[in-house]
Amino acid sequence: MPVRVELPSGAWVEVREQLTLADRWATSEGLEIQSRDGIQYIPASFGDQQMRNFLTSVITAWSFEGIPVPSQNIGGSAVLGTVFTNLDDYDALEDAVQPLYQKVSRNRPNRKVGGTTPSSSSSPS
């Protein structure tokens, strides 16, 4: 069942709560670690692109009349820059979806790695 996020401007966005493996894959699709002079680095826009990919995957409806949601829009995630002309609205949406975003993120806090969580590993005596 979608969750409606009310935005400061009075607009709204509905996002899907039931996440899938496809959502995880979509979030990181097209992201690349770059290399310059033999040094690998993550571009500053990496996190922003992950969020745009995530929103494209989970937005199911919105109040922006006549504009299809990103997953059904030929412009894909680029449409987010068209409809979110108010940065406060976009920030409110990002804040509201953080718990869902953390679920699909490979870098989520307390993620189990190798059967243990970071807090459950024992330190040498």
Image: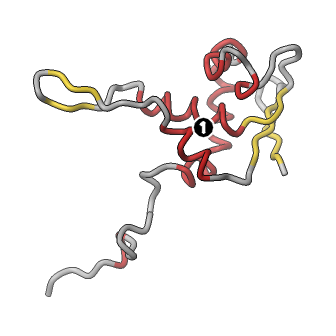
User: Horizontal and vertical percent for residue 93?
Assistant: 68, 34
Q: Quadrant of residue 34?
A: top left
Residue at image location 11% in from the left, 27% down from the top:
38
User: Horizontal and vertical percent for residue 65?
Assistant: 88, 17
User: Horizontal and vertical percent for residue 28?
Assistant: 48, 38
Residue at image location 70% in from the left, 15% down from the top:
74
Name the side, left or right, on which 69 lies relative to 117.
right
Name the side, left or right, on which 10 lies relative to 38.
right
* Total numbered badges shown on the rendered structure: 1
Q: Quadrant of residue 119?
A: bottom left
Q: Quadrant of residue 124?
A: bottom left
Which amino acid does the dot numbered 1 rest on? Phe
What is the quadrant of the C terminus in the image?
A: bottom left
> Label 1's element?
helix
Name the side, left or right, on which 4 lies relative to 98.
right
Residue at image location 80% in from the left, 38% down from the top:
14
Seen in the picture, residue 117 relative to 42 is either above or below; the reply is below
Q: Which residue is mark 1?
A: 54
Outermost residue to the bottom? 125
Colouring chosen for the image of the structure: secondary structure
Say few, some or many: other residues with alpha carbon within 10 Å of mark 1 (under 14 / 14 to 19 / 20 or more): many
User: Horizontal and vertical percent for residue 77?
Assistant: 62, 22
